[in-house]
Image (spheres, rainbow, N blue to C red):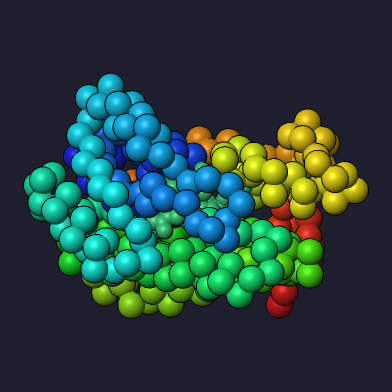
Amino acid sequence: MGRVDGKVVLITGVARGQGRAHALRLAEEGADIVGVDVLEDFATNDYAMSTQADLDETVRLVEKLDRRIVVRKADVRDLQSLKTAVDGAVAELGGRLDAVIAQAGICPLANSDAQAFLDAVTVDFNGVVNAVDAALPHLVDGGSVIATGSVAGLITGATDNPKTGAGGLGYSFAKRSVAAFVNDLAIALAPRMIRANAIHPTNCNTNMLNSDIMYRQFRPDLENPTREDALVAFPAMNAMPVGYVEPEDIAAMGLFLVSDESRYVTGMQMRVDAGAYIRNRPQQPAF
Ligand SMILES: NC(=O)c1ccc[n+]([C@@H]2O[C@H](COP(=O)([O-])OP(=O)(O)OC[C@H]3O[C@@H](n4cnc5c(N)ncnc54)[C@H](O)[C@@H]3O)[C@@H](O)[C@H]2O)c1
């Protein structure tokens, strides 16, 4: 018996990184996957988004586990096309959805164009709301909504500071809003025994972290820092002496929240952050 046998889970941003890790971990434990990804770059975002080859690889790896996966190219900012994609893919897998992991995201740091602020907000926050909106008609009673925030939304100044520009400000705003959204969404969904929780990662070993723009945030003292240069600085974020967590660490929390083990866990801000939050905000909670 797997921990999520027979469940169907929608994952946004499924082509690589944490999205792929969620898909594989859930498939290992018996779930089938509906996945969407944009597969297009953003002018305001310094590093590239996933490619068709990335998405194909996620499909290959899930199918290797003998689970089903139906994927669609869709932008989480576009509710109508997201709904069409999800409706079609869910129908192909039998018409029910047990959970949604709304986690597609961008991080347009150090871009001072107002468009960077708006892109961060519309992808990282509106995209989460849209994913829930697209999932809800199919979501079974007792289901689970999971949204990916970031410790950047919980720690003042992490990406909302003058160095990270309008894009960083938008990222913090969006992630803070994700935290607030799941809190109140949990109340709205509770009568149907559907829970809503956020996962807040610290630095995670994906393309988002392994990007030149991120290296520059961590090593402002160098003109063209490399990953090796940044590795020295990454641990400054965390209480534990590690620079980052792995996508599989986030997927472990995702699995718990999709599984019935978490059936009474709702409205929670689940940090997988090697102590980043407590390091930056000690003496919590306040009474
Ligand atoms: N990597 C980190 O250090 C870190 C830390 C905290 C939070 N997060 C959050 O984790 C989530 C996953 O990011 P990741 O680390 O796997 O990064 P990633 O860049 O590897 O993956 C993001 C995925 O989302 C897709 N995507 C982006 N915009 C989209 C859109 N509009 N519609 C559909 N798909 C879209 C991309 O193509 C990509 O496949 C994001 O919400 C991110 O903000 C990441």
243 on left or right of 120: right
Residue extending farthest to the front is 43
195 on left or right of 42: left
**x 69%, y 69%: residue:** 112
User: Which quarter of the image is occupied by the C terminus?
Assistant: bottom right
Q: Position of residue 163 (x, y in %)?
A: 79, 64
Q: Where is residue 244 in the image (x, y as percent from the top left)?
A: 67, 40
Q: From the viewer's side, name the closer residue of 132 and 263.
A: 132
Q: Is residue 241 visible?
A: no
Q: From the viewer's side, name the closer residue of 113 and 77.
A: 113
Residue extending farthest to the top is 64
User: Which quarter of the image is occupied by the N terminus?
Assistant: top left
**x 30%, y 26%: residue:** 60
Q: In this view, does 227 lie above or below 285?
A: above
Q: Position of residue 282 (x, y in %)?
A: 79, 62
215 on left or right of 133: right
Q: Is residue 137 visible?
A: yes
Q: From the viewer's side, name the closer residue of 174 and 48.
A: 48
**x 24%, y 53%: residue:** 98
- Give the total number of marks visible in the rendering: 0
Q: Position of residue 262 (x, y in %)?
A: 39, 52
**x 76%, y 69%: residue:** 161
Q: Is residue 128 above or below residue 11?
A: below
